[in-house]
Amino acid sequence: MPRDYSKYTAQKAPVTSLRPMLRYLLPYKFHMICACIALIITSSSVLGIGKGIGYLVDKGLGENNPDLLNAALLSLLGITALLAIGTYARYYFITYTGEQVVADIRRDIYNHILQLSPEFFETNKSGVILSKITTDTTLLQSVVGSSLSVALRNILMFLGGLGLLLHTSPKLTMIVIVVVPLVLLPIIILGKKLRMLSKESQDKVGNISSHAEETIVGIKTIQAFVREQLEQTRFSLLVDESLHVAKRRILIRSLLTAIVIMFVFSAVAFVLWVGGRDVLSGDMSAGELSSFIFYSIIVAGATGAISEVIGELQRAAGASEHIVDLLNTESKIKNVKKAVDISSEVKGSVSFDKVCFSYPSNLDKSSLNDFSLKVKNGETVALVGASGAGKTTVFQLLLRFYEFSSGAIEIDGVNIKNIKLNQLRGMFGLVPQDAVIFSASAYENILFGRPDATKEEVYAAAEAASALGFIKKMPQGFDSHLGEKGLRLSGGEKQRIAIARVFLKNPKILLLDEATSALDMKNEKQVQAAFEKLMEGRTTLVIAHRLSTVQKADRIAVIENGSIAEIGSHEQLLQKSGLYAKLVKMQFDR
């Protein structure tokens, strides 16, 4: 079963969890090398300032020599210029790499999501999944484009500063070294807690995103039932939960930073006191003490910065785990190793043989139970039955949105599991009950049926679906934006756009799921006439609750509890006085 991202718990996410993300850095080796060279230059420049300060104090000030003072100043200005240039190069290369890496990760996540079967989305909230593309990748962008650079720079500064400290005064350096374990101890102890809270905080933010998305999608229903206050309360509770976790995370991180600063700068003060005594006793010069204090501050600052970066890396490690888990999730629906290529040979016969299936979200209930049906090439078969009988499930399995547990489904005698997915789905033209309209123009929505179609073909498809009239009346005609999920269209107009898509695709097999349910009587007749032209010579499966729309079908299959209860023409089924006759009587009585 796919992982349920909506139920993530805060687990440990060590920094090593970022390792799988390193492969995204490989294409940008040149930029990373340039950034590393710039890091070395900037770190060396900062450390060189310490030597310059010592030289300035001992030679320029101590010997009261203006020429040496001028030389020391020029040297410091030169080091500062080199530092500025190196910082520019480091920021450019590392930030550019961060943007590129996150773009690649987002692209891979999106491409992977498109390949996952509907079963995955049935058991995972879309809002939480989308947060992987936004929130989690933003955290990784922060690491690659900033935190990683900060970490490397401060590691170099720490090691270089420590080396120069030893060179300047081994005795004082030992005092500094004693402080390091005192600083690392709270980082290790509090860092574990911080890591857990960081991941929990990301989960809470994902829940907020998921709830907000569901609210926006169902805004009309919420307002129709006057449930705005209820949704506000629910959202507020989710925000409060996220805020509570964030406060705990901030408290731990603040405490960690405060402890590090206290230990580090207390040690600096103590070193200054000991060093001052050495200067007074003549054991070291004022310039050496100045350099030592400078390097002590560098080492202390680097240690504090590293502790800050560790927190960022731990948050990013949690995000990396989420992303890797998602990318490692495999679709149960995939091509077999030796898939059959039948694209040029398809005639259109369909066969179900004792197929059994239950939806992943409701395994206790059988949607299809020993379902058997044979549809000849060019035949039109209507599927009727009560809601939940299994009609739409037939379409879902034909398109291989789900894998059935037993039985076989064949197209022209070839098991659909052995047919390439893109070829299999390319055979079908689906018009669903709830038409999906994309946030684009009318032209682009119809062109979705066959992207290489000409403008004339798009217009012809719209005319065949009785959509040309209302499209031309829109402000920009075919270029009119239809709004998010087609909010600017009526139900019937959405349906006709979806029908136009199928006309444009010109498939081998038609799947019409209540394709005319949202049309008025006049438009239904027009579209039905167009469908009859499209259905000529093609295998067609029609789902309809309005039995008047299926009377012309070659055969009608009555589905009850996931199995075919009876099958025949309209007249034959009426004569049997079975379930179909009862359904007809109920509708016409109404």
Image (cartoon, rainbow, N blue to C red):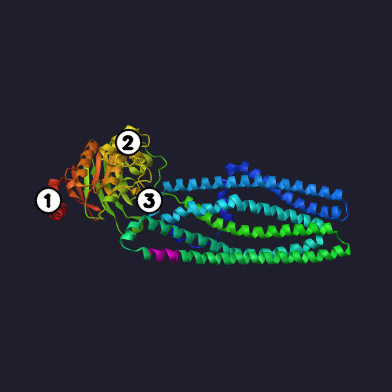
Q: Where residue 114 sits in the image (x, y, percent)?
A: 42, 46
For the C terminus, the image quarter is bottom left
Residue 428 vertical position relative to residue 169 in the rendered view, above or below:
above
Q: Toward which corner of the image does residue 308 lie, by quadrant?
A: bottom right
Of mark 2 and mark 1, the one earlier in the sequence is: 2
Q: Which residue is mark 2?
A: 458
Density class for disc 3 (Cα within 10 Å; few <14, some 14-19, many ≥20) is some
Q: Residue at x 71, y 60 (%)?
A: 300
Q: Which residue is mark 1?
A: 576
Q: Which mark is residue 118?
A: 3
Judge depth for marks 2 and 1 and give the one in front: 2
In the rendered image, residue 338 lying in the magenta stretch gets the answer no
Label 1 to label 3, Cα distance in Å? 39 Å
Q: Are marks 1 and 3 in contact (CB under 8 Å)?
A: no
385 sits left or right of 233 in the view: left
Of mark 3 and mark 2, the one earlier in the sequence is: 3
Q: Where residue 352 sits in the image (x, y, percent)?
A: 27, 46
Instruction: Name the amino acid, label 3.
Output: Pro
Residue 378 seen: no
For the N terminus, the image quarter is bottom left
Label 2 to label 1, Cα distance in Å? 45 Å
142 sits left or right of 494 in the view: right
Q: Where residue 81 sits in the image (x, y, percent)?
A: 72, 46
Of mark 1 and mark 3, the one earlier in the sequence is: 3
460 sits left or right of 141 in the view: left
Instruction: Name the amino acid, label 2.
Output: Val
For the magenta stretch, what is the residue range?
Answer: 230-238
Density class for disc 1 (Cα within 10 Å; few <14, some 14-19, many ≥20) is few
Secondary structure that dominates the magenta span:
helix
- Secondary structure at badge 2 equals helix
Instruction: Name the amino acid, label 1.
Output: Lys
- Secondary structure at badge 1 equals helix
